[in-house]
Image (cartoon, helix red, strand yellow):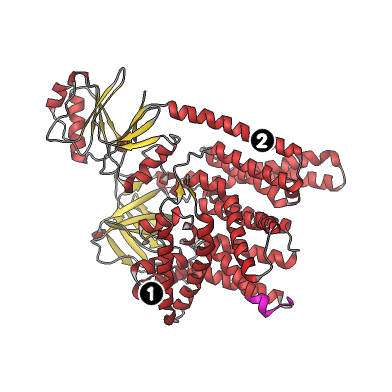
């Protein structure tokens, strides 16, 4: 860790991140600027004391400096949480009332099955007959029967009931509620087509709106000129809008470890940055025009950000590469300087928006850049051919390997899979994608003759990905927070061993590895020994699961719902054997469950022993069932039960004094044995 001691911003980022995590986890926050001022004043005083060579105060100075940064991170979260501010509109609206809203369309409209999803900025909302100024992000979903839709940057008015963002209803399911909350989106609206109309409000030139109109124009151009599948990929590469790419295609890219190429991100910005530097290295071999090179690089990178509609990942990458470019101009090109510049850009972005820390793309971008700056040169020192062709191939291999190693803990923690063919596929796919990206830019500036070559390359790309899709991943990896910490520590220690070849580091690495395995053995034993029955909540669908010490049995599985709603829970079972087969009866020492899913007939069972009924496939329960199941004490409704049927069953349960459990309101039903 010695080399990191010479990276000042590395030391500053760590306490800032600690403060952000504390601020996020502690819900009742108040912004105490007095504490920050007091800490800042103390740090300044101690800094000057230390400057006078008073070494005995150095420790106090460092402790207070860290406390100041922790406080900055903590209170920056409080400042960013709009819903904690007094008189926030979300505390004044009710989901039972309709409100008149004046809003502006703030991004490209996404077409869903029954609605159009519109990202909006709520300018004003009418509460108690008065318009309240809001200026915050939200979503409105407009029914497809709408004759006209809002235009980007234009205002419209609608009347609708606000809807709260639903919290996850299944174990370990992706928390969309928390995801939007960290973007200060707390409510959304579902709008009937007749309750919306455009309005004219005078506003000056807005660069963001202009960039988004450029983005919409790019989407329309590719849709008009190319095949739908080709257009969707080109649009994703240029603008980051990937909603129209086929789900199967996205899954194939994910399985081969190349999904990052489909979403415009730091990778594409980095490739463009390298291309700009490569062109200038040919034109200006003696580096006489450094300032001009810097200005042109910055302008071109921001122009690319404009093409993407100032997409958040590209914006982060552009800021990062701008800082890197300026740093390279005034500082020596050393690994320590580059890492310091990287940490500085991260520090500034986290101060501006602390919730970026929880953005997976943000974390992957920075860890990948760390790998390219720190690990790739070390790998290239092992072996690098002298000829240009061999050197290029090995540099691509080393860059993919370095980025994969540095992002491995984060990737396993968030995605729970490891693509086997990632190295081979990325060697070809990254240069090919960059070539396609360049052709897309040429196509945009009216060089339509490249369209044929673009189509051929896209066909080859899809064929290649499909070829390596089968058996390409190690899936359902149970990788938790302790695993993330242990693997990160081991990677650091292995690096120390290779750098300094100390026996003590080898012993420490082995000790950490043993501790990791002991923790894993405990987790595996706990997961394997747990027996349970689960009824998941899937909208308009039914799935239940039984787990014993050796296997997991699902009664029915829908692939579209499984990955999102059920698979996250399955991962925690630590590679139990998975079976899919129908069943309708589960019994333990003190409980007996019967699953009713067919309205035409009852399953054969000892009805007098049944104390819990699980209703699936919108099963119609009647008074006869309550008379038949004499020991019944609970009825469980899954996501397939329609609203009217659920209301009728609720009345019956009240009449016969039987407890009712609905997965729609309480989440998945879990019974441990």
Q: Residue at x 67, y 65 (%)?
A: 385
Q: Secondary structure at mark 2?
A: helix
Q: Which sits earlier in the primary sequence, circle 1 or circle 2?
A: 1
Q: In the image, which is nearer the foreground, mark 1 or mark 2?
A: 2
Residue closer to the observer: 526 or 267: 526
Q: How many marks?
A: 2
**In the shown orientation, is residue 390 left or right of residue 40?**
left
Residue closer to the observer: 234 or 624: 234
- How crowded pointer 1 is (Cα within 10 Å; few <14, some 14-19, many 20+) is rated as some
Q: Residue at x 38, y 49 (%)?
A: 187
| Vertical position of residue 301 compared to residue 64: above or below | below
Q: Does any portion of residue 577 appear in the rendered image?
A: yes
Q: Secondary structure at mark 1?
A: helix
**In the shown orientation, is residue 582 left or right of residue 162?**
left
Image coordinates of residue 312 in percent, x first then y, are: 51, 59
Image quarter in which the N terminus is found: top right
Is 285 a magenta residue?
Answer: yes
Give the Cα distance between marks 1 and 2. Answer: 57 Å
Which residues fall within the magenta stretch? 279-287
Give the number of the disc on residue 510.
Answer: 2
Image coordinates of residue 25 in percent, x first then y, are: 53, 38
Image coordinates of residue 101 in percent, x first then y, are: 35, 56
Residue holding disc 1: 221
């Amino acid at each position: 860790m010695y080399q990191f001691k010479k990276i000042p911003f590395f030391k500053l980022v760590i306490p800032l991140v600690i403060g952000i995590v504390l601020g996020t986890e502690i819900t009742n926050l108040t912004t105490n600027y007095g504490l920050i001022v007091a800490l800042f004043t103390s740090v300044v005083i101690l800094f000057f004391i230390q400057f006078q060579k008073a070494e005995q105060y150095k420790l106090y100075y460092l402790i207070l400096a860290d406390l100041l940064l922790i406080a900055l991170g903590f209170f920056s979260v409080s400042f960013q949480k709009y819903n904690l501010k007094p008189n926030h509109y979300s505390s004044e609206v009710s989901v039972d009332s309709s409100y008149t809203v004046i809003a502006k369309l703030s991004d490209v409209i996404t077409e869903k099955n029954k609605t159009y999803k519109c990202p909006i900025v709520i300018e004003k909302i009418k509460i108690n007959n008065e318009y309240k100024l809001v200026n915050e992000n939200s979503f409105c979903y407009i029914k497809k029967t709408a004759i006209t839709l809002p235009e980007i940057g234009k205002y419209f008015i609608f009347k609708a009931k606000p809807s709260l963002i639903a919290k996850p209803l299944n174990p370990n399911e992706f928390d969309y509620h928390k995801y939007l909350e960290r973007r200060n989106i707390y409510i959304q609206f579902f709008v009937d087509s007749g309750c919306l109309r455009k309005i004219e409000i005078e506003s000056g030139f807005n660069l963001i709106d202009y960039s988004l109109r450029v983005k919409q124009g790019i989407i329309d151009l590719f849709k008009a000129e190319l095949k739908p599948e080709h257009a969707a990929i080109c649009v994703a590469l240029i603008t980051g809008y990937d909603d129209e790419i086929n789900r199967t295609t996205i899954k194939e890219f994910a399985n081969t470890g190349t999904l990052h190429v489909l979403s415009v991100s730091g990778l594409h910005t980095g490739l463009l940055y390298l291309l700009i530097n490569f062109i200038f290295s040919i034109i200006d071999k003696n580096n006489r025009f450094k300032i001009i090179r810097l200005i042109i690089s910055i302008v071109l990178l921001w122009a690319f950000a404009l093409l993407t509609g100032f997409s958040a990942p590209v914006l982060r990458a552009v800021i990062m590469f701008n800082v890197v470019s300026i740093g390279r101009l005034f500082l020596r090109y050393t690994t320590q300087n580059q890492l310091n510049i990287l940490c500085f850009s991260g520090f500034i972005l986290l101060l501006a928006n602390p919730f970026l820390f929880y953005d997976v793309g943000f974390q992957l971008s920075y860890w990948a850049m760390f790998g390219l700056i720190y690990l790739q040169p070390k790998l290239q020192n092992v072996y690098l051919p002298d000829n240009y062709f061999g050197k290029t191939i090995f540099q691509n291999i080393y860059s993919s390997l370095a980025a994969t190693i540095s992002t491995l803990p984060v990737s396993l923690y968030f995605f729970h899979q490891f693509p086997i063919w990632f190295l081979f596929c990325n060697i070809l796919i990254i240069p090919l994608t960059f070539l396609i990206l360049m052709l897309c830019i040429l196509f945009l500036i009216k060089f339509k003759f490249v369209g044929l070559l673009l189509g051929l390359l896209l066909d080859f790309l899809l064929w290649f990905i499909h070829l390596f899709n089968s058996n390409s991943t190690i899936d359902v990896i149970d990788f938790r927070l302790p695993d993330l910490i242990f693997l990160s520590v081991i990677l650091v220690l292995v690096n120390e061993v290779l750098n300094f070849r100390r026996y003590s580091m080898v012993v420490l690495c082995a000790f950490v590895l043993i501790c990791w395995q002991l923790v894993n053995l405990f987790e595996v034993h706990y997961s394997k020994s747990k027996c349970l029955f689960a009824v998941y909540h899937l909208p308009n669908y039914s799935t239940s699961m039984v787990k014993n010490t050796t296997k997991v049995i699902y009664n029915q599985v829908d692939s579209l719902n499984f990955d999102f709603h059920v698979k996250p829970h399955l991962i925690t079972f630590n590679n139990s054997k998975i079976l899919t087969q129908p069943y309708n009866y589960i019994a333990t020492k003190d409980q007996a469950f019967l699953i009713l899913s067919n309205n035409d007939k009852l399953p054969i069972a000892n009805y007098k022993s049944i104390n819990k009924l699980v209703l699936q496939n919108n099963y119609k329960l009647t008074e006869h069932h309550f008379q038949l199941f004499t020991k019944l004490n609970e009825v469980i409704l899954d996501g397939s039960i329609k609203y009217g049927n659920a209301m009728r069953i609720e009345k019956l349960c009240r009449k016969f004094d039987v407890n009712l459990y609905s997965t729609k309101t309480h989440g998945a039903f879990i019974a441990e044995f």
